[in-house]
Amino acid sequence: MIRHAVSAALLAVALAAPVQLHAQSWKTVTSSRQVTDEDHLRVHVSYGAGVLKLRRSEAGLLYRTLFRFDEESAVPSTEYLHGTLNVDLSRRERRSLNFGHRSSEASLDLELSSEVPLDLELDFGAGRAELDLTGLPLRELEVNTGASASVLYIDETNPEQMESASITVGAADLRVRGLGNLNAEKVEVRAGLGSVVLELDGEWPRDGLLSVEMGLGTLEIRVPESLGVRVRHRKTILGSIDAEGMVRNGNVYRSVNWDSAERHVEIEISAALGSIDLVWIN
Amino acid sequence: MSQPSHLGARIAVSAGAALLLVAPATRAQERTIVSNQVEVANNAASLHLELSDGETFAITFVDGVANVNGEVLGTYEPGGSADRSWRGLLANVLTLANGPLARELGQWGPDTDLGGVEMDLLRELDLVLERAVSGADGERLQARAPQRLENLLEVMARSDNIQGLGEALDDVDLESLSIWLQEDHTIPAETTVTGDVLVAGGHLDVRGRVRGDVIVLDGDLTLSTAGLIEGDVSLIESELDHRGGTIEGRVVDVVRELRREESQIRDRIREELQRELRGGRSSRGQEWGVFARVGRAAGDILESALTFLIVGVLTLLLTRFWGERLGVVTRAVGHQPGRSAVVGLAGGFVALPIYICGTLILAISLVGIPVLLAWVPFFPVVVAIGGFMGYVGVSHHVGSWVLERDFPWLDRVDRDHNTHVRLVGVAAMFAPFVIASAVRVLPLLGWFGGLVAALGTIASVAATITGLGAVIMTRGGSRPAGWSYAYGDDEFESAAWSSTGDSGDPVTDNEDVGPESADADDGASDSGSDQDGTDTP
């Protein structure tokens, strides 16, 4: 609620002074819908630029979107029909040279229900993304991000079992926290260029499989000491792997607690060029 | 803004507010706000609600115009008190949904400090929001409609210009028409109204931009310096105060335009009536006045008389110089009219081919070239002379027939004088044309005149063809046709006709001698010879 209050306060200031914002043609659009009889919600978000924030909504709310954008350069859309929500902010034809600057200031706050199972697909391009999946009952997760700095975290165990989760990163920095709370049988991470940090903290309700494909960049996998991991390293051309505290057997690295750990995670790494670090955390 | 706040409306509002105060939660639960959307921009602030019973509300404040579900609720000054109040409400409800949102909307009301037109708008808005969240019937909201209708009827009755309004609205898209009845309205600077604008019984002040036509009925229009009207301005019993703004379309004083058109129609009708009375050609040029018809008939008769004069002179010359040949042709027509007609018809058909072929043959033969110089001009002349000679020959018989009728007004005509007889015949041949011209003077008998003229033309053509045949059969009157062979007196007739003439011809002036002498043997069978009187056997 504090977050809401802060947002409301900021927006109230902005709304109360429309004349001051006249030169930039900023527009704010909010949409929300109540939970009725939905048995699931399929969400597709396509967001071109700016800041994307995702979190769970308050009780009884199926979704809420809050766009803030330059109406001369972008067109928002929030469409809901028969359990499918499409959220989109598409660009208009470029009209000014400072489009990029303006678009980088645009934002989308998306709140999704914690009461309805979700199939979530996020496509977003240049900009920043803060994806708080905490409390969201995710059945499917697919994240595709172009050039951006993205943070994805989940602080509570996903109440829904997920068969697989997919995170694809183009040229960006990605930090994922709480992978153990995704409750996914398999997590696939593909990164083209950039820095990827994967924290395997969380509850891990069951053993899991993590598949990482790296193009060019650095990969850091942060592993709780309580978790038994086995790393299979493939297709390394010029890549190096630093697996301190691991027992190596060819391309396979295994944690020393593998046999005694309650939960085990198999990690398959395919890195073309770059460095791979395995870091132990408490 | 209109003034709908009558006592009844106030009571209704008060009653509705009281009900809301008594059981606001109950009403809110009756209608759940399923979804809502708030849009706030520099020039717009809108709220969209979807309620549990499927009803939707779209309340938009855009460019100085407030709409509810597409219908104009009123106008406001951007950045003014109404705009700020509305935006403040939206800011408060931005993060709310369903119950809290409904409560916030239901409890909202305009600040009592406000006044004037914008206060009226906010009151209307308050009613709309109350209805939206409470689900109350639309009586209070719809109470505005009769008021607007009443205003419209009042303006129409006062302006007495329904026709003008209809004319002004002729090309207007009613879907996009914004209407202000008996109220003043200002389109603020730096705002744009899309669509046509109608103000009836009020003052319209355009300081911004109107992307459409502007119609003012029984009011006045002020166009400020920065004002822009992209369409036409139609004024119906209204005045325009043009203070330097721009009107891209036309400025039409509809009443004056209508009066001008009526005047034009009246002038046109008057002109047509006058033209009809003058007997002149009507607008369609198909009817004629009496005087014009008489004049035209006189002209036609004069034309016929001149033609008759020319033909008569030619007849005199022909009789004078080729009397004998003309006599032979005349008798040939009288004895063998059918044969003459057939021969003449054939001759008429072959004349042109002969002319062309002869010209070609003479042209391609070096020897014939000198002849060609004579052939080309003279052949048509010869044919024409032949046709005319035949025509006169037939006219001789016609003249004889006419004189046999013993018309008293022809007593002075010398029936024994070939020239007189032929002129009478020619006159008789011209009579149909004169009659036709005279008949056309009378109304409704034009067709009869045309019929008589056509018969006259046919008779003249037939006479010419028949006469031409006789000319051909008699080789231009140089020898008698073959009828005499049937009587076995060919040699006698030939000898007689080839002689210098009939010595017993009583025609003293020696106009024509041939026919008279040739009639010595055919007696009563030849009417022409009978009339000659000189050919008594």
Image: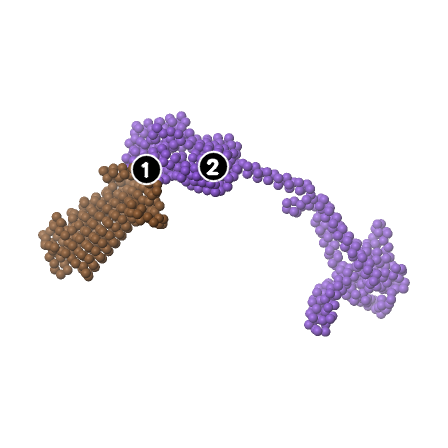
Chain colours: A brown, B purple
For label 2, the residue is: B243
The answer to which of B190 and A161 lies nearer the viewer is B190
The residue shown at (67%, 42%) is B276
Please report the residue visible at 32 percent of the width from the left and 29 percent of the height from the top.
B20
Image location of residue A131, percent across then percent down: 23, 46
Q: Is residue B69 visible?
A: no
Q: Are marks 1 and 2 in contact (CB under 8 Å)?
A: no
Separation (CA) of disc 1 from disc 2? 32 Å
Q: Where is residue A238 in the image (x, y as percent from the top left)?
A: 19, 61
Is residue B236 something one can see in this rendering? yes
Q: Is mark 1 on a helix, strand or loop?
A: loop
Dot in front, 1 or 2: 2
**Secondary structure of residue under mark 2:** loop
Give the quadrant of residue A136: top left
Q: Name the residue under label 1.
A: A17
Q: Which residue is depicted at the point 19% across and 61% down?
A: A237
Q: Position of residue A80 (x, y in %)?
A: 31, 44
Relative vertical location of residue A179 with respect to residue B172 in this rendering, above or below: below
Instruction: Compare residues A145 and B281 and report the one nearer the observer.
Output: A145
Residue B96 against residue B448 in the figure, above or below: above
Rendered location of residue B367, percent (x, y): 72, 74
The amino acid type found where label 1 is placed reads Ala
Mark 2 nearby-residue class (10 Å; few <14, some 14–19, many ≥20): few
> Which of the 4 image quadrants contains residue B122?
top left
Q: What residue type is labelled 2?
A: Arg
The residue at 41%/40% (across/down) is: B192
To which chain does the residue with label 2 belong? B
Q: Mark 1 belongs to which subunit?
A: A
The quarter of the image holding the N terminus of chain B is top left
B530 left or right of B154 in image: right
